[in-house]
Amino acid sequence: MMGVRAVSRPEKTLLDGNGAAPAVGWLCSATPEELLLAAGFRPVRLYGFEARGEESEAVLPTTFCAYVHGVLQAALSGAFRHMAAVVVVNSCDAMRRLADVWERHIKAPPVYRLDFPFVGGPAAESYWVAVLKKLAAFLKALSGRAMTEADLRQAVAILNETRLRVRTLDGLRAALNRGISGTDYMQWLVKAFVEDKRGFLAESAALCTLAETFKDGIGMNVRVVLGGCAGDARLLVRRVEACGTQVVADALCTGTRHFDTLVREDADPLRAVARRYLHRAPCARRVDAMGFVDYILRLVRETKADGVIFPTLKFCDMVRWRLPRLAAVMAQERIPFLHVERDGSAASWGQMETRVQAFVEMVGKRRDPPMAGRKDRHAGL
């Protein structure tokens, strides 16, 4: 559809380092972008890296996921040398080992380890606030200037506006009278991850205005919610939609889930930021398994999806250990569910597409006529 696609290549912006502000790279959704922005940096997610290489496999076990290997391979080749630093969260053992190898083998940029709590509660909140203060001190030493409360409040406002804009775009892809495809939506989402936030807001505002004129009619493809682990969501959604689906929602940390919760603007800004990251939509890493499952179930209900497709990267144990509970709940609720594993290679895409095509055919045969009764079928979920 003309006027919809985010035509720039965000990964080129990421690697070229052409932004006016120095960039700080990050990998995990627990990274508080507000602090990076308030310190005068441009937060940039290290996005779209799944290519293993001889260099990365020489220093990391081959049993780590393709995302960690892809980031390390790019770093060893100097792809991020223009950045001021890279923040790595202790989200899994592979990420911790990535930080170890980074410190030993990569001179620039420096890596900063961020210790994010596995649980919630008052003790976790106090600990997390202390961790964020240490991050602020590191950023001060990096930039040469102190972060003020006004800086942090302004950053909170910008990030909240970004989240609200993403929410608007998310509504367009989920609409029965579709405004944008899931593929186009993901292109815009990646711009929000890697480009200047003010630039993203200005460009996407034009799309939201244009969307008022969209008259696509009712989509006939199978409506699915997409789950899974870290990876290039642009390519993932494009491949899944090419199999005859409409991706109407996702629970990806490299997708919409990163933007789902606002920071309170009427409270102490540092503590408000801490609470937002502790209480945002749950990921598979957190202790509360049912919170992760309930979040996906809620997306199915809200979007009236026909099923759930859950691709994972091989060796992503943090996500895989939630699969038995998730599959059991989907079966109990009679929601078609497909788990498919990729290893990050080009060949694994073809294998995934074959299974998705079979899943779409199965769901298409069993579902109600495209729109008739769809509301009733989900009313009792």
Image: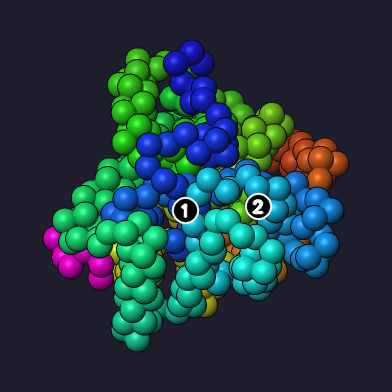
Is 281 placed above or below 81 here?
Answer: below
Task: From the image, tell me which residue sits under label 2.
Answer: 75
Q: Amino acid at mark 2?
A: Ala
In the rendered image, the residue lying farthest to the left is: 266
Tag count: 2
The numbered mark at residue 84 is 1
Q: Where residue 228 appears, x then y in whole percent? A: 63, 54
Q: Which residue is nearer to you in this view: 66 or 196?
A: 196
Residue 48 appears left or right of 155: right
- Estimate the spatial distance between the alpha carbons at disc 1 and disc 2, rounded to whole Å: 13 Å
Residue at horizontal 48 percent and vertical 13 percent from the top:
2
Q: Amino acid at mark 1?
A: Ala
Residue range (magenta): 263-272
Q: Which residue is nearer to you in this view: 186 or 75?
A: 75
The numbered mark at residue 43 is none
Q: Which residue is nearer to you in this view: 101 or 276?
A: 101
Q: Where residue 311 appears, x then y in whole percent? A: 69, 51
Mark 2, other Cα within 10 Å: few <14 / some 14–19 / many ≥20: some
Q: Where residue 350 appears, x then y in whole percent? A: 82, 38
Residue at horizontal 27 percent and vertical 59 percent from the top:
145
